[in-house]
């Protein structure tokens, strides 16, 4: 076994979910390439005095159900999984799928039933209230998306995932404090001119305790405060479908126009999953210095240093603006010069320009100070 799996497993168990003796932990292993880390996690959890429950899953298996099940079967499936999650204290999900397009041909109605059954029954009301951490695991499919050799990508992956999150967490404190004091946010850049309020909504540091890799500080917009337009320059995957150059026109918090390079009908279908799908539930700034370009993997892309993501759909409980939805779609805009630049202003003051923080108190989050 690669010794880096052992190190990462110990970090996940002891730091990310802080597993205590006697606590039960649900370990979901998705994809055969994730099995080595899965075994290391079961061992680490056991050695920590925990009681692990392990579950193997991947899209090749899941598509056999998602493609053929009816609405009542999805509802029963969600209700079956809920008590399992209710009876554990912590959850770690390791994603190592071999083909991100395995669900690309699933009918929209099927995916809608699936998302509602999982999000409404398990994810939102149960899992998000546990100690949890979700991560990807390197495999040839991810290396291809990152356009890197598999071995090189694995080295990059462990650098990203095993960085000094305690140091990052301390550097996040001034940004979190500033977010907590801010009312108006203004985002500008190519195809983007958007204003909204974050008044009264708290900042949440993501510093290795929920996602690996990690590196973002998030809050949520006041639900009906957003006006303007935004164009996302990073491609995104949802339901096995790739979308590029997504543009939203927003009025009083609601997406009133949606376009993209690709399947516009499918884009709008995802947004129309329920009423909350066309409102926003999260606004976050990415600060991981090792992640510099998108690779069609949300857990990596949303942490890109110099990026932000503005998320249609459900708000997290920790920064709850009241928006509820079966959708939570983290779509990324990168503001470094190579991607066209851009500015973020808080209450009329520019805090980040072309991907770099310009206020002295925030400069600790720039890449040269975190690597």
Image (cartoon, rainbow, N blue to C red):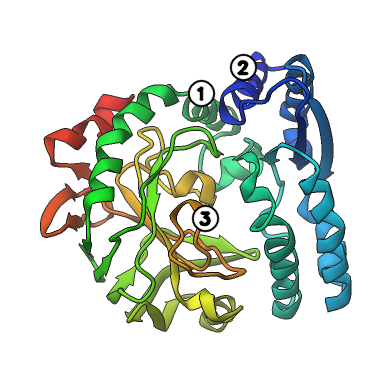
**Mark 1 or 3 closer to N-term?**
1
Question: Which comes sooner in the sequence, label 2 or label 1?
Answer: 2
What residue is disc 2 on? 7
Do labels 2 and 3 touch, CB within 8 Å?
Answer: no
What residue do we see at 61% from left, 17% from top?
Answer: 7
As measured in the structure, the alpha-carbon distance from the residue carrying label 2 to the one carrying label 3 is 31 Å
Question: Which of 194/226 is in front?
Answer: 226
Whether residues under marks 2 and 1 lie with C-beta atoms below 8 angstroms apart, the answer is yes
Residue at 46 percent across and 48 percent down: it is: 301
Vertical placement of residue 49 versus 94, above or below: above
Q: Is residue 30 above or below residue 235?
A: above
Dividing the picture into quadrants, the one containing residue 138 is top right
Quadrant showing the N terminus: top right
Q: Which residue is mark 1?
A: 162
Count of numbered marks: 3
Q: Is residue 70 left or right of residue 41?
A: right
* Mark 1 surroundings within 10 Å by alpha-carbon count, few (fewer than 14), some (14 through 19), many (20 or more): some
Q: Residues within 10 Å of mark 3 (few under 14, many from 20)?
A: few
Q: Secondary structure at mark 1?
A: loop
Q: Residues within 10 Å of mark 2 (few under 14, many from 20)?
A: some
Residue 317, numbered label: 3
The spot of residue 340 in percent (x, y) is: 23, 57
> Which residue is at 69% across, 78% downward?
108
Q: Which-is-in-front pick, marks 1 and 3?
A: 3
Q: What separation in Å lies between label 2 and label 1 (alpha carbons)?
A: 8 Å
Residue occupying the point 73% across, 34% down = 34
Q: Which is in the foreground here, disc 2 or disc 3?
A: 3
């Amino acid at each position: 076994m690669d010794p880096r799996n052992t190190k990462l497993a110990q970090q996940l168990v002891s730091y990310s979910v802080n597993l205590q003796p006697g606590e039960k932990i649900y370990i979901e292993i998705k994809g055969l390439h994730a099995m080595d880390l899965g075994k290391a996690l079961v061992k680490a959890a056991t050695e920590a005095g925990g009681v692990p429950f392990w579950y193997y899953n991947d899209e090749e298996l899941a598509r056999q159900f998602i493609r053929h099940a009816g609405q009542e079967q999805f509802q029963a499936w969600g209700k079956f999984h809920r008590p399992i999650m209710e009876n554990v204290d912590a959850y770690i999900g390791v994603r190592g799928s071999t083909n991100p397009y395995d669900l690309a041909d699933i009918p929209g109605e099927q995916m809608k039933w699936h998302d509602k059954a999982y999000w409404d029954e398990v994810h939102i009301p149960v899992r998000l209230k546990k100690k949890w951490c979700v991560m990807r695991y390197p495999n040839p499919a991810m290396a291809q998306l990152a356009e890197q050799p598999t071995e090189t990508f694995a080295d990059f992956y462990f650098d990203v995932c095993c960085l000094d999150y305690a140091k990052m967490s301390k550097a996040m404190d001034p940004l979190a404090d500033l977010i907590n004091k801010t009312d108006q946010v203004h985002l500008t850049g190519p195809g983007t001119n958007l204003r909204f309020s974050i008044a009264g909504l708290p900042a949440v540091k993501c510093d290795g305790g929920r996602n690996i890799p990690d590196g973002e500080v998030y809050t949520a917009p006041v639900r009906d405060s957003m006006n303007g337009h935004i164009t996302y320059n990073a491609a995104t995957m949802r339901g096995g479908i790739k979308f590029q150059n997504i543009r939203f026109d927003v009025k009083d918090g609601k997406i009133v126009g949606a376009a993209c390079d690709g399947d516009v009908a499918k884009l709008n279908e995802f947004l129309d999953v329920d009423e909350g799908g066309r409102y926003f539930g999260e606004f976050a700034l990415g600060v991981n210095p090792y992640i510099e370009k998108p690779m069609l993997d949300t857990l990596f892309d949303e942490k890109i240093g110099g990026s932000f993501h503005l998320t249609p759909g459900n708000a997290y409980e920790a920064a709850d603006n009241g928006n509820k939805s079966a959708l939570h779609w983290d779509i990324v805009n990168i503001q470094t010069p190579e991607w066209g630049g851009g500015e973020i202003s808080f209450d009329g003051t520019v805090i980040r320009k072309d991907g770099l923080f310009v206020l002295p108190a925030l400069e600790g989050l720039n890449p040269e100070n975190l690597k």
